[in-house]
Image (spheres, rainbow, N blue to C red):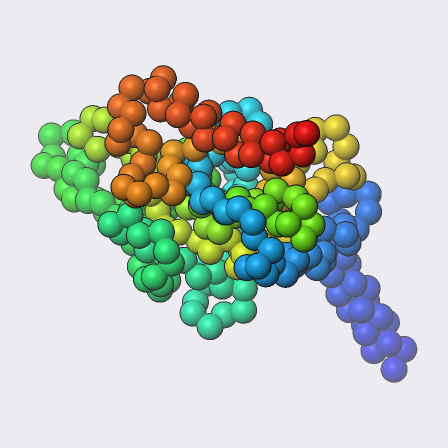
Amino acid sequence: MKQLKKVFLLLVLLGAGFSVKAQVLDRAYVKEHNPFRKLIPYTYLREADVMWYHRVWRVVDMREKMNFPLYYPKDENMRDRNSLFKIIKKAAFLAEGTPGRLTVYSREQDDDEFNVKLNPVEVSHILIHVDTIQVVLTPGAPPVDKVTVDTLLSEAISKYWMKEDWYFDKQKSVLECRIIGIMPIFLKSSGGSIGDAPTFWIYFPELRPLLARNDVFNRHNDAERITFDDLFWKRQFSGYTIKENNVYDRYIAKFKTNTLEALLESERIKMGIFTLEHDLWHL
């Protein structure tokens, strides 16, 4: 009887040891704030309160230093930090009907109005590239076909396109911006040349709950990290305008073929929005 008790006690201790080993705490404390944060919803906006409204399309380039928190880390196996694309990809690959699945929309034929939903299989066709190459296994032997499967990684994302609505709320007397959609862009090589390849559109309000539970690296203090949702809400990123609402429904690059002229036109649109708000309070 005593031997059975000893064996039972030994098994309990071993089980406790294994459970402790499986739940290693990789920091001095348990993170409870950001991972369980509740999303702060947008304030209700009446059409009657919108005194002025304008829609713009913007590019957020990952090569700009201010946008590094969105791009890094490249390693997708890190548990403590996530890149923006890793969050999007993980939620987009979930099966339909799974809680937390992110709905993605087709961008074919420049459709950015969230008309066509993509299922997980269609998403995999965009994010997973299957190719057949010929390799020589042994010297002198004929080449054989080898199937390669490459999943699009965070490091391949070069830009994000965003669709934004700027409006002046006369009830609160403030100029505000709400992001409507976001689309990852990756670098794709074809025929010896490298260019931007769009993926799919994401309805940003649906993405916000995921962003609110993932924090962004803070180089000054790891204990005071903000979330991705905070970063977008506080406009702590850099971008340039590629299109605004216009009668021709065309991008800036269509009528400003020179790169410098396109950047100047982008700056003109930006300053136009700033000047409008400034002039409202100018006596």
Please provide percent x and percent y for residue 92: 44, 57
Which of the pair 221/14 is nearer the observer? 221
Residue drawn 72% across the image and 56% down it: 37
Residue found 45% across the figure and 31% down from its top: 269
The answer to which quarter of the image holds residue 192 is top left
Q: Residue at x 43, y 67 (%)?
A: 95
Quadrant (top left/top right/bottom left/bottom right) for the C terminus: top right
Left or right: 139 with respect to 237? left
Residue 217 figure quarter:
top right
Picture quarter with the N terminus: bottom right
Viewer can see residue 67: no
Q: Position of residue 243 (x, y in %)?
A: 37, 37
- How many numbered marks appear? 0
Residues 185 and 55: in front is: 55
**Foreground pick, 238 / 20:** 238
Extreme bottom residue here? Answer: 1
Where residue 124 appears, as percent x and y from the top left, is 34, 55
